[in-house]
């Protein structure tokens, strides 16, 4: 039975048993059958400073959807990360010429009485009221941990009140306790969109020979979409971007595309398989278009799949030549400087490849999780290279990061905008690894990032001042210990 036919999708650790959350050591080849230092899925920490609830990335997609209201069914604090997401939603809407309003989300605010008596009735009332007050086209009911534990049936409630509301109701099962891997969020959101907003195959009359689906991610902005759309346009094709900030119509259009291409394999694999299975749309799931070679590989892959190989090659060579000229001065300046990166798996690895191309030595990469999709990127970084890169798989865990940074003393740290403070307080210049207001992807993105890093490195005074004022709270004895001393196999825990 296709996975989409079931009410609830499987969690990531069931679909990808190799997925891991705890690892530390030198980065080695993970090429199939040749794994020198395998990454243990059955490992964890004896001490942890936190984790990431799948709601965080899930809401990043859901809140961006126009004409859509997100109804969080759970305790009142569940999904409070939506406040932090709001700036992205406002800016994302504004740059797309839409009224720049706040993200539209409500909570059913389950309390102790609901835990005992059940929250189904409260949810039904909230759905009717939300529809009357806001008139959205779509309402997404998101189940947090509480309804999952007490057994509320959000699908049954949604089906029961569907006739009373004009919005289409979708349900997303995003109970944080079910999966330790935030990538599960992508699957549950795609599952709901695929089941609720896509047409039946019989409704798709003809394929559009020029249209390709480009599956965007919450960490890219309009600038990145424009750059990738420009490159796709240069070879005579048209890009249909979804799901982030995409109108439900883009999902209908997706069903008649001739090819789907992923930007981040970890993000997209579930839905790419669905599009192939249900609408016979072939797909490409390799390479993130961050970095010069990566962008060329990505574009040439699209060209080959669409019978436009020579056109894609021609565009890629011309772009590489122009960019090569523009980057000459930057490469000279970056030569031999040491970089440390931290982010989602694919993003951190692909950005490391770009920094290597710019002349940096990569000293360490921290990835929120590891799955088999990373192997191809790890191979690119380790192949033909004798430089040792420390690879740390960590769902945040800043104590490990602080220890590593003290030892490795990089010249620059690239991490999330909310994850750069440890490095900054150690006096290390930082650069956000993504910011939806800036460009990072394609050839233009490579140039823009080089320019921003150069500026950081030439003006380190802010960080030097922070180092003296913003001491971290770890004891000296922690810095003397092995940064990975808290990582154990399940048996040893
Ligand atoms: S889904 Fe669960 S883990 Fe996530 S915020 Fe809600 S209560 Fe917390």
Image (cartoon, rainbow, N blue to C red):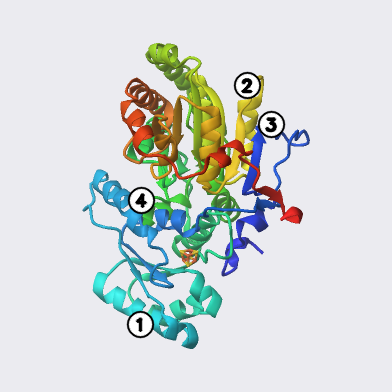
Q: Mark 2 points at which residue?
A: 387
Q: What element carries label 1?
A: helix
Which tag is nearer the camera, tag 1 or tag 4? 1
Quadrant of res 126: bottom left
Residue 28 got which mark?
3
Identity of the residue furthest to the bottom in this view: 117
Seen at 41% across and 63% down, the residue is: 79
Q: Label 2, label 1: how many angstroms apart (C-alpha)?
A: 60 Å
Packing grade of label 2 (10 A; few <14, some 14-19, many >=20) is: few
Q: What element carries label 3?
A: loop
Quadrant where the image shows the C terminus: bottom right
Seen at 32% across and 26% down, the residue is: 461
Pick whichever of labels 1 and 4 is earlier in the sequence: 1
Seen at 52% across and 66% down, the residue is: 175
Q: Using residue 330 as the reference point, say whether residue 260 is left or right of it.
A: right
Question: From where the camera sits, is residue 299 visible?
Answer: no
Which of the pair 408/97 is nearer the observer?
A: 408
> Please, is residue 180 above or below residue 324 in the view?
below
Q: Label 4, label 2: how many angstroms apart (C-alpha)?
A: 40 Å
Packing grade of label 4 (10 A; few <14, some 14-19, many >=20) is: many
Seen at 26% across and 57% down, the residue is: 102
Q: Label 3, label 1: how many angstroms apart (C-alpha)?
A: 55 Å
Q: Label 3, label 2: how many angstroms apart (C-alpha)?
A: 11 Å
């Amino acid at each position: 039975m296709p996975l989409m036919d079931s009410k609830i999708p499987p969690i990531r650790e069931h679909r990808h048993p190799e997925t891991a959350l705890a690892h530390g050591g030198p980065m080695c080849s993970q090429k199939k059958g040749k794994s020198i230092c395998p990454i243990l899925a059955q490992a964890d920490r004896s001490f942890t400073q936190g984790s990431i609830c799948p709601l965080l990335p899930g809401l990043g997609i859901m809140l961006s959807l126009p004409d859509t209201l997100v109804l969080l069914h759970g305790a009142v604090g569940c999904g409070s990360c939506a406040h932090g997401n709001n700036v992205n939603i406002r800016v994302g809407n504004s740059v797309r010429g839409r009224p720049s309003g706040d993200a539209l989300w409500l909570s059913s605010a389950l309390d102790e009485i609901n835990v005992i008596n059940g929250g189904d009735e409260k949810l039904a009332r909230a759905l009717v009221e939300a529809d009357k007050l806001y008139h959205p086209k779509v309402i997404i009911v998101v189940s947090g941990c509480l309804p999952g534990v007490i057994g509320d049936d959000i699908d049954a409630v949604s089906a029961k009140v569907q006739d009373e509301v004009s919005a289409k109701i979708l349900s997303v099962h995003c109970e944080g306790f079910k999966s330790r891997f935030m990538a599960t969020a992508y699957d549950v959101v795609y599952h709901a969109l695929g089941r609720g907003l896509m047409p039946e195959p019989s409704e798709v009359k003809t394929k559009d020979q020029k249209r390709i689906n480009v599956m965007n991610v919450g960490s890219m902005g309009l600038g990145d979409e424009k750059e990738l759309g420009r490159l796709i346009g240069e070879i005579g094709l048209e890009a249909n971007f979804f799901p982030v900030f995409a109108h439900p119509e883009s999902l209908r259009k997706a069903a008649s595309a001739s090819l789907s291409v992923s930007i981040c394999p970890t993000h997209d694999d579930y839905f790419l398989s669905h599009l192939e299975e249900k609408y016979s749309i072939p797909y490409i799931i390799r390479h993130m278009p961050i970095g010069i070679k990566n962008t060329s590989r990505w574009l040439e892959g699209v060209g080959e799949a669409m019978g436009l190989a020579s056109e894609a090659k021609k565009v890629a060579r011309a772009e590489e030549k122009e960019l090569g000229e523009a980057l000459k001065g930057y490469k000279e300046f970056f030569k031999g400087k040491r970089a440390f990166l931290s982010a989602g798996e694919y993003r951190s690895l692909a950005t490391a490849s770009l920094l290597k191309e710019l002349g940096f030595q990569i000293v360490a990469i921290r990835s929120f999780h590891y799955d088999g999709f990373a192997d191809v990127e790890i191979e690119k970084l380790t192949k033909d290279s004798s430089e040792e890169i420390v690879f740390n798989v960590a769902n945040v865990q800043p104590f490990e990061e602080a220890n590593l940074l003290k030892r490795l003393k990089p010249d620059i740290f690239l991490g999330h905008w909310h994850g750069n403070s440890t490095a900054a307080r150690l006096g290390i210049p930082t650069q956000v690894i993504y910011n939806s207001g800036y460009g990072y992807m394609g050839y233009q993105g490579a140039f823009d990032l080089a320019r921003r890093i150069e500026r950081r490195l030439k003006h380190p005074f802010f960080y030097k001042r922070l180092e003296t004022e913003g001491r971290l709270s770890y004891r000296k004895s922690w810095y003397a210990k092995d940064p990975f001393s808290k990582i154990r196999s399940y048996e040893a825990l």
